[in-house]
Amino acid sequence: MLHYPVHSISNPPWSMVSLDMRVGLIPWVTPAFERGLAILLRNGSALEKHFGNVLPLAFFLRGGPGDSRETAFRICAPTNAVKASAERWLMRAYLTRREEGPHERLSDEAGRTFSRHDYSDREGTRKKLFFETTDSIGREEEDFEEFPARHFRDDTVKEHQVQERTRSNTCEVQAQQMSEEFFQCWKAAGIHLNKQVNIGIQSWLRAHPYPPVLEHLSFRLGNQLFFIRVEDVGGKVLGPRTVSELVAAAKSANGHPCILPMRRNLAEQWAAFREGWGLLDAITRNQINPAALVTDERVEMTRWELHDMGVQVVRDYLKKEGFEIMSWNGNPDVDPSIWFIGESKSPEWVVVRSTRFPANRAERPQNWETIAKNCIKLSTSGHFASVALVSIAQPFVSSDEEPVPLWRGHGMHISFIGLESKPPAHVWNLVASVAIQ
């Protein structure tokens, strides 16, 4: 069963089209339309012949909930009339308004331009909704014609199928590299976050720029996980992947999806746009303070965390053996988990599986041949790694005792005997004991 996202002012539809086929007087928005349009544009159709003409399509490229310039919507449409209509219909569809107020165009010191709509909500409170027009004002047609090349890559369909991903996607996660310009922004973002804790963030989950990427940075603070997407408030420097994928990744790990807005200061250095942590909730766009969300509550580790722990164990093992790590990912729905330069002096891959007590080893995936087939263009050398985890509080007094939950941030024993070519029969081998502080 497909589960489409619920659209709102914080999570606007990816696109809108008008039933009148003119200037967008009657928009039509459904999840099926979004997905169908993505497939249509990706595969090619007669629509391409008219792309750039007066076509009543509007694309919401970024932004939301639009209550400030930092969260302004960015709309791409073929004409100013269609874009203006899309602005009105977005408000009509997702805002409960008592009264519509004036509309005006604004600009800021950074040279960005905005369209601002004033309105009163149901309680009569005066509010504003912002749309950024920097890239398109006065050049709507050109902006719309450039849209496929700038925004529509092969991963767009996958972007709208996050909930449908399975392990059949082996080796199909796009290796989206960070641009050099975004890398500098990303590095400054990591340094900024690290400074928010007196001794620095001790438990980084992702603090490297290598693909595959869903979140740009992630870390654990106490019993909470935070997944970060770094964004240039000027919209000029773009990082890989999308907000929807960030939210999906955070949800799978029972974590918090966050946006870290960054901008260049007068010295042309990247800095956080806001004071303190500078983070926004990726869904509500409200400010978020990670330290304030940490509690004494015991939180059980998710499937995502167990897998990520297993990947860390295998990655550290390979490093100690002197191998060069090419890339790794902690997503349990993506295979392989690790690429490295092995004894063959060429790329090799590892499929990692984690399990917990009372199991003493993880099973090799049934689709092993499919994984190998999908990786064959890069390497014919693949390995399997089983990582078994058990709480340090497990008493081991009987063969049928209940497993002690693996609590986030608590200690655990790890059983890992190295890379395998054939699954061995083995028993618990507590070769490592870690206490995550």
Image (cartoon, rainbow, N blue to C red):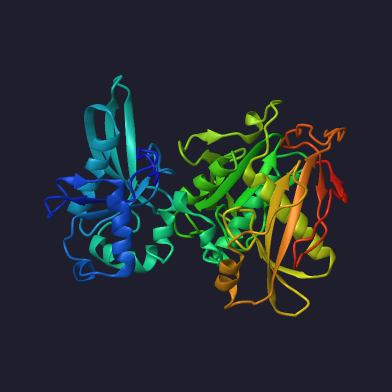
Q: Position of residue 88 (x, y in %)?
A: 22, 41
Which of the 4 quarters of the picture holds residue 276? top right
* Residue found at the very far top of the displayed protein: 123
Identify whether 87 is placed above or below 56: above
Q: Quadrant of the C terminus?
A: top right
* Residue found at the very far bottom of the displayed protein: 345
Left/right of residue 112 with respect to residue 173 in the rendered view: left
Left/right of residue 197 with respect to residue 8 in the rendered view: right
Q: Position of residue 267 (x, y in %)?
A: 59, 56
What residue is at 27 percent from the left and 46 percent from the top? 30
What residue is at 14 percent from the left and 53 percent from the top? 23
Q: Is residue 297 visible?
A: yes
Q: Depth check: give the residue in front, 371 or 140.
A: 371
Identify whether 78 is placed above or below 375: above
Identify whether 350 is placed above or below 390: below
Q: Position of residue 97 (x, y in %)?
A: 26, 28
What residue is at 11 percent from the left and 51 percent from the top? 20
Q: Is residue 136 visible?
A: no
Q: Depth check: give the residue in front, 169 or 321.
A: 169
